[in-house]
Structure formats: structure tokens, C-alpha cells
Image (spheres, coloured by chain):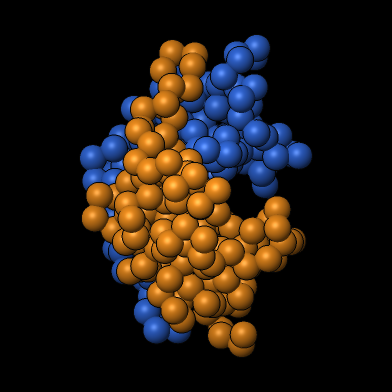
Chain colours: A orange, B blue
Amino acid sequence: MSHAWLDEVKWTSDGLVPAVAQDADSGRILMMAWMNREALGLTAEKRVAVYYSRSRQKLWYKGESSGHEQLVEDIRLDCDADVVVLSVRQKGGIACHTGRESCFYRRLEGDQWVTTDPVIKDPKQIYGQ
Amino acid sequence: MSHAWLDEVKWTSDGLVPAVAQDADSGRILMMAWMNREALGLTAEKRVAVYYSRSRQKLWYKGESSGHEQLVEDIRLDCDADVVVLSVRQKGGIACHTGRESCFYRRLEGDQWVTTDPVIKDPKQIYGQ
């Protein structure tokens, strides 16, 4: 892709940028994942979040297996141009592969990470395992 | 530091974890920076955000030169244990070194990044340059 706006992003040496997805209504931070140039270009074009899976080393169309797509309302870039924030509407109300609304379901209480969020849907049901 | 909860964080090969700071009231995402083990430990202990500056390769006590400290209400960890989110109260209402509330002051409109947020305070005044 030859979009000049993509050239303004400061990609890592691996050609990636961290992307934070935030619920457009509640402001809840749902997840952070990575995008390469193609993923960010597709996200802007289709208005649906596309990430890059570092473990699988390929594009990750969020929701492709779960149905939990993220409809993108807004894309923002930070002062250093090395982080993007997506404002999204989360289909199914579940962003996390554990079946929770947000991946940030653990809170530091004293010296322990405590799970504070319920599982909305069993991952076995989501992924049909 | 020997805190077991710090061992649960999946640090990068450089010993870092990305930290997203979000305004405790509005939910606005203010910035993303990095923390090493010491920074996260100090943040939890002092309830004030301490990051690790990758460019300066040392602890970055947020607000040390600007006065714009971040009082930490909440620390969360994601499902992969490789990202943290801080819920903060931002002193001065300015998180960004450009003098804006948030570092994410540019919005993608069409094929351009458009600055949408005003400068609240001239950085020259903030940093006394």
C-alpha cells in the first residue's frame, strides 16, 4: 500500500505498531495487539479491526473464528507516531479469547493479580472446540 | 524485587512490558510507554506512574520535570500477561509532552492524520526551556 499516512507511522524494526482497542461507548480498554502496514491499511479501509499475529506470522482478522469482530469508529496516532488507538464497537461484547469482555480482566490487589471479570461465554462454545 | 506478581508478567527479551495509561474518570487513553520490572514495582508501591525510557535507558518518573504526575488508581494485566493498563488521575490534565491532554491527539480522517486536540499549555512553559 502506498498511502502516505501509513508512512507517517513509526514501525518497529519488525514492521509492526502496537494497537490498543477501546470500547467506543464505555471507554473500557479491550485488548492490545500488533499491526503491520497491511493490517492497519485494511483496518482503515474496511473499518473492521485487522491485526498481525506475531505467533502465527500472518494477518489476524479479528473475529474470523469467534465472530467477535470489532467495528472501527476511530483511529488515532500518538505524538511519537509509534502507537495507535482504535475506538471500536465490539461484536458480542467479548474481545478476549477467554470469553471475557476485555483481556484486562486481572487487577493487582496487594501483591496478587485477581480476576475481576466474569466469563461471558465459554470459549469452547465460541470456538466450537 | 522479589515480588511473585512481577514474575507473572511476561517481559519482552529486553525486560519490558508496554503500559497503557487511561484517565480514571473519562476513560480517555492518555499514553503508552514501557516499564521494566523496577518501574512496575515502583508504580505499584508508590501509586505514581514510573516508566522506563528506552531512549534514555533509565527509569522515567513521569512528571519529574513537568510536574504532570499520574496518580495510579488501578493496575491491570491482560490475558497473555504481556500488557498492563493503568487507570490514573493525571495531574495538570496534561499527559503529553506537547502540552496536550493525551498523546493520541491525531485522528485519521480520510487518508490524513488530523490534529484534533488543543495544546493546553505551551511545552516551553511546562519544561521551562
Q: Which of A111 and A119 is in front in this view?
A: A119
Q: Which residue lies furthest to the bottom in this view?
A: A2
* Residue A10 in sight: no
Residue B18 image point, x, y percent: 57, 42
Q: In this view, does B9 lie above or below A62?
A: above
Residue A98 image point, x, y percent: 48, 41
Q: Is residue A113 above or below residue B126?
A: above
Residue in the picture at 32% in, 52% down = A93
Q: Which of A89 and B105 is in front in this view?
A: A89
Q: Nearer the viewer, residue B67 or B16?
A: B16
Residue in the picture at 70% in, 53% down = A55
Residue B61 image point, x, y percent: 51, 31
Q: Which of B93 and A44 is in front in this view?
A: A44
Number of numbered discs on residues: 0
* Residue B16 in sight: yes
Q: Is residue A78 above or below residue B42?
A: below
Q: Quadrant of residue A74?
A: bottom left
Residue A108 image point, x, y percent: 44, 23
Q: In which quarter of the image is residue A21?
A: bottom left
Instruction: Point out the image quarter for the N terminus of chain A.
Output: bottom right
Residue in the picture at 53% in, 21% down = B42
Q: In this view, does B41 lie above or below B2?
A: below
Residue in the picture at 51% in, 52% down = A127
